[in-house]
Image: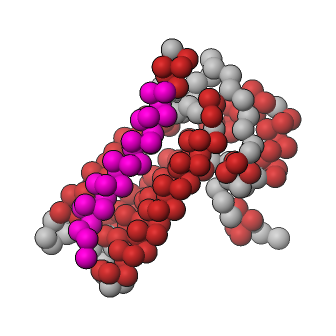
Amino acid sequence: MIEAWLVILIHQIVFQGMFVIKNVALKKKFGKPIRGNNKEANLSIALFVVFIAVSLLISMWKQPIGEVLILSKSLSMILGLVLLFLNLVISAASLVGLKDSWRVGVLEEQKTELISSGIYRFTRNPYFLSYLVMFMAYTVILQNIMLLVLAILAFLLIHKMILREEEYLYSVHGADYIQYKQKVPRYCCDDLFKSS
């Protein structure tokens, strides 16, 4: 069976590689920053880095702290690999689909086009969704309670960042954004959580 640390490392090279390529290409094309300097984005990025670093450390320890084996190691690896594949598909589709409107965090001085095609027909936040799938994948592979806690914290920060972006998108796109918001879920299966 392939080592968990190697899976995480290869996944991060691909996942972060796509992210860096998109950011560098847009910065070069526009000659301006594409990353907002707001509290939500900075905290989220810091927590993502911590989550990935802790995942790598746990995967290399012989006696990992917080391990809770619910599944066999081979089954957890298979499920994790499926989730990581899904993560890469969702993130690639979101990076391609957002075209030149891609930004990291809110940049209020830049106005971007409202994208509602491609993967954005199914979820308003596919890149954040891809991060949530990644957190789930690493937690399943390593079956670790520390990662579960970090994943929950990351979800809360992501949700807060999304709420900030929704305010910004409403201020820029008005009724078009409200209409889009009514048709497309924030994550993916929002209807499952609504009370009738």
Looking at the picture, does residue 3 appear above or below residue 187?
below
- Seen from the viewer's position, the closer of residues 42 and 101 is 101
Residue 3 lies in the magenta-colored region: yes
> Is residue 128 at all visible to an observer of this figure?
no
Q: Residue at x 75, y 65 (%)?
A: 191
Residue 103 is a magenta residue: no
Residue 113, placed above or below residue 65: above
Main secondary structure along the magenta-highlighted residues: helix
State the residue lying farthest toward the top: 31
User: What colour-coding does the image apply?
Assistant: secondary structure
Residue at far left of view: 62
Q: Is 31 situated left or right of 146 in this image?
A: right
Closest to the observer, 135 or 196: 135
Tell me how many marks there are. 0
Residue at figure coordinates x 45%, y 39% from the top left: 19
Residue range in magenta is 1-25
The quadrant of the image that shows the C terminus is: bottom right
Is 177 situated left or right of 2 in this image?
Answer: right
Within the image, what quadrant is residue 171 found in? top right
Question: Residue 136, how many percent across, how many down?
Answer: 45, 64
Image coords of residue 121 (percent x, y): 74, 51
The answer to whether residue 105 is above or below residue 156 is above
Vertical position of residue 17 compared to residue 174: above or below: below
Q: Looking at the image, which residue is at 41% across and 68% down?
A: 81
